[in-house]
Every structure is written in C-alpha cells, then in structure tokens.
Image (cartoon, rainbow, N blue to C red):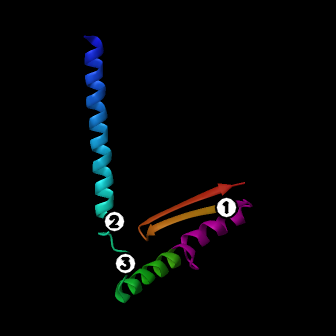
Amino acid sequence: MYLLKKSKVTLIGTIVVLFIIIFLLINNVLSKGDISEVSPTISTQQQAENERKVDEIKNFIYGDSGIIKQVDDELVKKGYQFQTLVMANSVDDVMVKYILS
C-alpha cells in the first residue's frame, strides 16, 4: 500500500515537472521573434538638457567656488593628506567622502 502511494506521488511529480519544462521551452521558442534589437535613442533636446545638468553639477562640485575646492583647500591648509570620493545624482543630491591618511 505504501509503495503504491509513493509510486503515484513520484509519477504525478514527474508529470508536473515535464509539463513545466515543456511550457518553458515552448514559451522561450515563441518569444524569440518578438524582441526587437533597436537601441534606445535620446532626442537632441533631451541630450542638450542632460549635458547642461552635468555641467551644472561639475561646476557646483569642482568649480572655483565649488564644494570640493573649498574643502580641499581647508584640508591642505591644515596639513592633511586625503582622497576624495564623489557621487552626484543631481545638484541637490551629492555624496562626498574624504579618506584621511
């Protein structure tokens, strides 16, 4: 009796796994033709706006009166040696880390 139940469970499990494998293979074959290989494009206006934002961030961070210049000057004046890590998503979202050595 126990052997019969175990065989039924094994048979049902094998059939379910086979159905899943067949479904995945059929789905994979059918979806290959649907995907287009076109690269995304950015309009010239959007590209110009992005470049303007990058220039604004660069000036804010690295310009003559930028944050990095001011802090670097103070650290050099006090005799520190350091490395600077900068991550800027926008002018309002800037992360600066200094590693003092």
Residue 83 is marked as 1
Dot label at residue 74: none
Please state the horizontal and vertical placement of residue 97, each as a whole percent of the image.
Answer: 57, 58
Q: Which residue is drawn at the image coordinates 25% and 10% (left, top)?
A: 1
For residue 74, above or below residue 22:
below
Could you give the CA–CA distance between mark 3 and mark 1, rounded to whole angstroms? 41 Å
Measured from the top left, where is residue 34 in percent x and y?
29, 69
Question: Which of disc 1 and disc 2 is earlier in sequence?
Answer: 2
Q: Amino acid at mark 1?
A: Gln
Looking at the rendered image, the disc whose residue lies closer to the viewer, 3 or 1, is 3
Q: Earlier in the sequence, mark 3 or mark 1?
A: 3
Q: What amino acid does circle 3 point to?
A: Val
- Residue drawn 37% across the image and 82% down it: 42
Nearest the viewer among 64 and 98 is: 98
Which of these two is toward me, 76 or 36? 36
Span shown in magenta: 61-82
Helix, strand or loop for disc 1: strand
Q: Nearer the viewer, residue 23 or 68?
A: 23
Disc 3 is placed on an element classified as loop
Disc 2 element: loop
- Residue 38 - label: 3
- The mark closer to the camera, 2 or 1, is 2
Q: Nearer the viewer, mark 2 or mark 3?
A: 2
Is 29 rendered above or below residue 60? above
Q: Residue at x 28, y 12 (%)?
A: 2
- Quadrant of the rendered structure where residue 74 is? bottom right
- Give the percent coordinates (x, y) of residue 5: 25, 17
Identity, as a three-letter code, of the amino acid under mark 2: Lys
Q: Quadrant of the C terminus?
A: bottom right
Which residue is tagged 2? 32
> For the residues marked 2 and 1, what is the alpha-carbon distance in whole angstroms?
48 Å
Label 2 or label 3, whichever comes before in sequence order: 2
